[in-house]
Image (cartoon, rainbow, N blue to C red):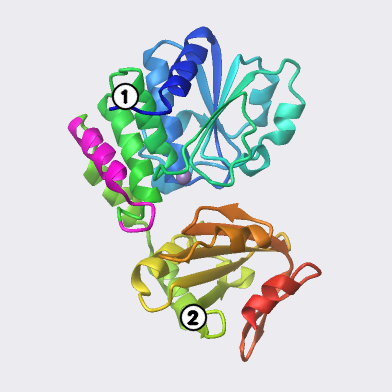
Amino acid sequence: MHDPYQNAFKKLYLLIQKAEHILICAHQKPDGDTLGSSSSLLNWLIREQKDAVVFCKSPVPLMFQYLDRSHLISNDPALFTREFDLIIVLDSGSLPYCGIDEYIDHMKTKPTIANIDHHATNELFGDLNIVMTSASSTAEVVARFYDANSIHVDDKMATSVLTGLMTDTGNFSNGATNAHALEYASHMLSYGARIHDIQRNINHVHTVQSLQLWGRILDRLRVNTKHDIAITYVLTKDLEGMPENAESGISNFLNTYLGKHETILFLNEQSNGTVKGSIRSVHRNIAKLAQNLGGGGHANAAGFTINGKIEETPSGPRIVGVDAKQLNDLLS
Ligand SMILES: [Mn+2]
């Protein structure tokens, strides 16, 4: 199959062959795509007898610890005091998004940076940029890289790639789902990917407590008819004593099950004085909307972060904060 990215994939392969010490970076607050892509490449590089390590600023969530060699993923910034020839950044629109900009700034010798991603808002910060905005996931880009270089994919590498494909497509149900996502998923199954292992880990992670939290969030769901947006939110105090990431997945859940309203906005109040917003839409391109609010993302799944707190009012949530005017216009 002809792939216009063939040259870039060959270049990446050469960079890897040339490098002796390789650092793979997954983005902070990691999802299945960044971790799946990282663990897949790590397993391959170890097989190639390369000195390779993975850094992720946040710890690997329990639900992703089935990924092969995920226990080797380090959140120790001291890694950046070592010398590397190559850094491979996965699934990150920018270095600050990944959480490694300051660490890289302080490195004595500057490694070559390969930027592998699928976000339309990617800032092309790498020396080599392979940003496939049409790809369902970064894991799909990794699978195409293996294909382009005739790299044998073993069951470990395949399980990790399939994890990225399944999580970024919401189990092949959201707007990122396309023929290639299913095609590569099929390839990964034929290479021995452990799909039942993935299913059990990524979909059966909820406790009674976290589902009760979802109940509270669903109870707050309101429709803003002026902008045709369904809005709900979670407060910092709701998350006290909850399992980690208890609220994650709710915007995708709403996007899958709330058929009538095209756009969903989920506001998540953080303990550091910011509010994170996730926007999902099946047909509307909401990347611009997220960008206008200082964020970014894909046409159907995007997000932003603003300074402020959520105030509950009878007509719904409002944000108390200096830069909140634009968002409050959307909420009113
Ligand atoms: Mn992704």
Q: Considering the whole magenta stretch, tell me its main secondary structure.
A: helix
| Circle 1 residues within 10 Å: few <14, some 14–19, many ≥20 | some
In front: label 1 or label 2:
1
Q: What residue type is labelled 2?
A: Leu
Q: Could you tell whether 79 is left or right of 245 in the image? A: right
The part of the chain drawn in magenta is 173-190
Q: Which of the marked residues, 1 or 2, is nearer the chain's N terminus?
A: 1
Percent coordinates x, y for residue 299 in the rendering: 49, 56
Residue 70 can be seen, yes or no: no
- Image quarter where the N terminus lies is top left
Q: How many numbered marks are there?
A: 2
Residue 206 can be seen, yes or no: yes
Q: Residue reaching furthest right?
A: 322
Percent coordinates x, y for residue 139 in the rendering: 40, 37
Q: Which amino acid does label 1 sit on?
A: Asp
Q: Could you tell whether 320 is left or right of 190 in the image? A: right
Quarter where residue 164 is shown:
top left
Residue 201 vs residue 91, the one in the foreground: 91
- Image quarter where the C terminus lies is bottom right
Q: In the displayed structure, would residue 279 be above or below residue 113?
A: below
Q: In the displayed structure, would residue 172 be above or below residue 149?
A: below
Number of the label disc, if any, that sits on residue 221: 2
Q: Residue at x 65, y 37 (%)?
A: 95
Q: Residue at x 23, y 34 (%)?
A: 187
**Magenta-drawn stretch contains 178:** yes
- The CA span between labels 1 and 2 is 44 Å
| Residue occupied by mark 1 | 147
Percent coordinates x, y for residue 238 in the rendering: 57, 72
